[in-house]
Amino acid sequence: MRAAVIHGKNQAPVVEDFQAPEADGDALLIDITTGAIGPTDLMRAAGFFGPMAYPYVPAGEGTGRLADGSRVYFGHSVAPFGGWAERTLVPAAEVWPIPDEISDEHAVTLAISGTGALIPLEEARIQPGERILILGATGPLGQLALQLARLLGAGVVVGAARDRDSLARVRERGWADEIVQLGQGDDLAALKAAAGDGYDVILDTVYGPPAEAAMKASAPGARMMSIGVAAGATVTLGLGDLVMRSHIGVGTGQRPVAERRAAYERLLDYGMKAALTADVLVFPLDEAADAWKAQSQSSHAKIIVRP
């Protein structure tokens, strides 16, 4: 079968012939219709999660059809298979149905990116009227988080990121009430200017110095939920910065499959009832290297490949 294949650490995928999967135990064969990547796919290829066995097909999630023709979303393919190919093999527990009302692109956009936003925002227990800050607001996870924060009761939603044009777009669409451009010299001053009496909840997708600044601009009782490390893997905060505040590192992909599936189903419901969506960029399989490059350059969209 044709697939995008990674042959070594930090290498971009190459489209070539690759072994086709065969049925194995309770794993299901899926004919792929979309395969999607995110920041963790690049981190995996860079060895962030430990040594990889090469060659392998990237893309941790996607959509496709089972042998009976039913449309499904999948995650966690059996190695060395993945979503950037014509076919994959996935444990049955990780294969979830897609409602007829939801397109393949919509389903795969809502899944990992959506649960990465929904679970920490739910666990932050947003109270009506609170001021919510989304760090990394212009990527697909951030775009979904802006919308979900309002659906969960936020009073004011503030989006922060580095790209001015992308920030302007999320405000124009009504997803953010206020925006903050980071990386212009003094992130703390920029965040405080939009903080009012302080942020009550911070969804932090970048960590590093922006997260430090955000916590220092928070209100007493604030909850910072951190889920990514794009801006750095550590923060430095004094005890005074944390008094009457909480900082939680939230894991979503490591949670039990039943919990992740329930969150996915809640997101599909939001997607249908509240038009929850995010930007996507779709590439044909032969342009997988371009799709990989787009992800590495922070395209501010969900990167999807169609075989």
Image (cartoon, helix red, strand yellow):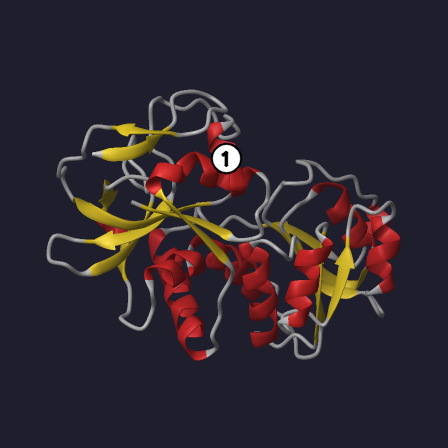
**Residue 72, position in %: x, y?**
25, 57
The amino acid on which the numbered mark 1 sits, given as a three-letter code, is: Leu
Q: Residue 89 placed where, x, y %? A: 22, 41
- In the rendered structure, the answer to whether residue 73 lies left or right of residue 238 reads left
Residue at x-position 55% and y-position 38%: 296
Q: Is residue 307 left or right of residue 188?
A: left
- Residue 174 in the image, given as x and y percentages of width and height: 64, 74
Residue designated by label 1: 42
Name above or below for residue 277 compared with residue 235. below
**Where, quadrant-wise, is the N terminus in this rendering?**
top left
At horizontal 75% and vertical 63% (from top left) the residue drawn is 179
**Left or right, residue 12 beside residue 169:** left
Work out which quarter of the rendered image holds the C terminus and state it: top left
Which secondary structure lies at badge 1? helix
Foreground: 192 or 197?
192
Identify whether 183 is placed above or below 123: above
- Viewer-closest of 207 and 2: 2
In the displayed structure image, the side of residue 91 where residue 234 appears, left or right? right
Q: Image point 25% across, 44% down: which residue?
A: 90
Residue 264 at x, y percent in the picture: 39, 62
Whether residue 21 appears in this view of the structure is yes
Mark 1 residue crowding within 10 angstroms, few (<14) / some (14–19) / many (20+): many
**Residue 134 appears in view:** no
Q: Nearer the viewer, residue 87 or 294?
A: 294
Residue 87, located in which quarter of the rendered image?
A: top left
Q: How many marks?
A: 1
Q: Image height check: is 276 above or below 112?
A: below
